């Protein structure tokens, strides 16, 4: 009999989703600060790198339909 273990990325995303849901009301003026706080939470509690935490938070924000995840990075101006 084999036990099913969730993928670590799924665990991180789930943790990010719970954090975002708990703290969303504190950030009515924008989602950038919420994103930063959620990344910091994953880095501190799960001991992961910033890029790994950022990816998990981005995926969680996308699933929750939060605005910061919908923004594209700025593009360089054409000259």
Image: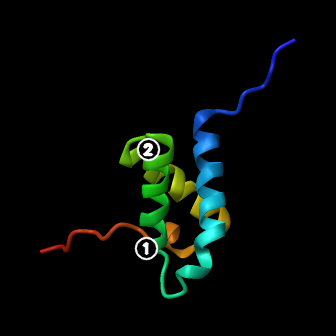
Residue 43 percent location from the top left of the image? 43, 48
Q: Position of residue 22 (x, y in %)?
A: 65, 68
- Looking at the rendered structure, the secondary structure element under dot 1 is helix
Establish if 43 lies above or below 74. above
Residue at the far right in the pictured view: 1
| Outermost top residue | 1
Residue at the extreme left: 79
Q: Which residue is mark 1?
A: 32
Mark 2 = which residue? 52
Q: In the displayed structure, would residue 51 be above or below residue 24?
A: above
Mark 1 neighbour class, 10 Å CA radius: few under 14, some 14 to 19, many 20 or more: few
Q: Quadrant of the N terminus?
A: top right
Instruction: Report, in whole angstroms, how far the alpha carbon at label 1 lies from the one at label 2.
Output: 17 Å
User: Does label 1 or label 2 sit earlier along the sequence?
Assistant: 1
* Residue nearer the viewer, 37 or 31: 37
SS state under label 2: helix
- Residue 54 in view: yes
The vertical placement of 73 against 27, above or below, is above
Tell me if residue 65 can be seen: no
Q: How many neighbours does mark 2 have within 10 angstroms: few (below 14), some (14-19), or many (20 or more)? A: some
Q: Residue at x 37, y 48 (%)?
A: 50
Q: Residue, x 51% and y 58% (percent of image)? A: 58
Q: Residue at x 72, y 27 (%)?
A: 5
Front position in the image: 53 or 67: 53
Q: Is residue 50 left or right of residue 37?
A: left
The colour scheme used to paint the residues is rainbow
Residue 10 located left or right of residue 28: right
Q: Quadrant of residue 21?
A: bottom right
- Find residue 61 and report its image quarter: bottom right
Seen as rendered, the residue at the extreme front is 45
Residue 47 in picture, x, y percent from top left:
44, 40
């Amino acid at each position: 009999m084999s036990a099913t273990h969730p993928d670590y990325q799924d665990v991180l995303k789930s943790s990010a989703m719970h954090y975002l849901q708990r703290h969303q009301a504190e950030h009515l003026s924008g989602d950038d600060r919420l994103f930063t706080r959620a990344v910091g939470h994953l880095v501190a509690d799960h001991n992961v790198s910033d890029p790994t935490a950022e990816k998990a938070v981005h995926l969680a924000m996308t699933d929750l339909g939060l605005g910061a995840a919908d923004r594209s990075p700025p593009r360089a101006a054409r000259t």
